[in-house]
Image: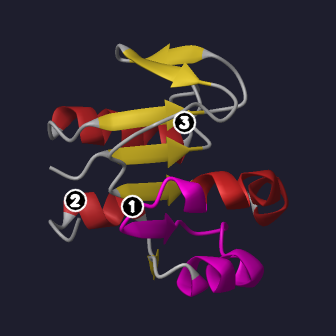
Amino acid sequence: MKKTLVLGASTNPSRYSFQAVMQFKQLDIEVVAIGNKEGEIAGIPILIGKPGLDGIHTVTLYLNPQRQEEYYDYVIGLNPKRIIFNPGTENAVFIKKIREAGIDVEIACNLVMLATGQY
């Protein structure tokens, strides 16, 4: 299945990043979570920093454009097949860099994609 990195994960159940991690787990999609604080979502650890990761198919962003900048090289370096910009995360500069690296970009709501079978 499509191993997914949720970048901007939160332990707050009202946050969409939390809900996304929960849906991935419920759908048996391998998920990795990175946030600004360590924690856990239903047994999935929230990592901090820029850990070495292998086999990431999709990165789904839950960081505003200003917070994304420090992750540009890291995310592109993971060599995912696609990066999803959730509502409020759209970033023309980052999108340009991603496309130049040959990675697919989707501007969509990850939760809607999962709910409608478009993931």
Q: Quadrant of residue 23?
A: top left
Q: Secondary structure at mark 1?
A: helix
The nearer-to-camera label among 3 and 2 is 2
Q: How many marks?
A: 3
**Coordinates of residue 78 in the picture (x, y in percent):** 50, 53
Task: Tell me how far mark 1 sits from mark 2, CA to CA.
Answer: 9 Å
Q: Secondary structure at mark 3?
A: loop
**Coordinates of residue 115 in the picture (x, y in percent):** 22, 59
**How many other residues sit within 10 Å of disc 1, few (<14), some (14-19) or many (≥20)?**
many
> Measuring 57% from the left and 24% from the top, which residue is drawn there?
47
Q: Visible in this render: residue 63?
A: no
Q: Secondary structure at mark 2?
A: helix
Amino acid found under the numbered disc labelled 1: Asn
Q: Residue furthest right?
A: 66
Which disc number belongs to residue 14? 3
Q: Is residue 12 above or below residue 42?
A: below
Q: Magenta residues, as a range?
A: 76-100
**Coordinates of residue 4 in the picture (x, y in percent):** 35, 47
- Asked whether 97 or 85 is in front, the reply is 97
The nearer-to-camera label among 1 and 2 is 1
Which disc number belongs to residue 115? 2
The residue indicated by pointer 1 is 110
> Measuring 74% from the left and 57% from the top, which residue is drawn there?
68
Amino acid found under the numbered disc labelled 2: Ala
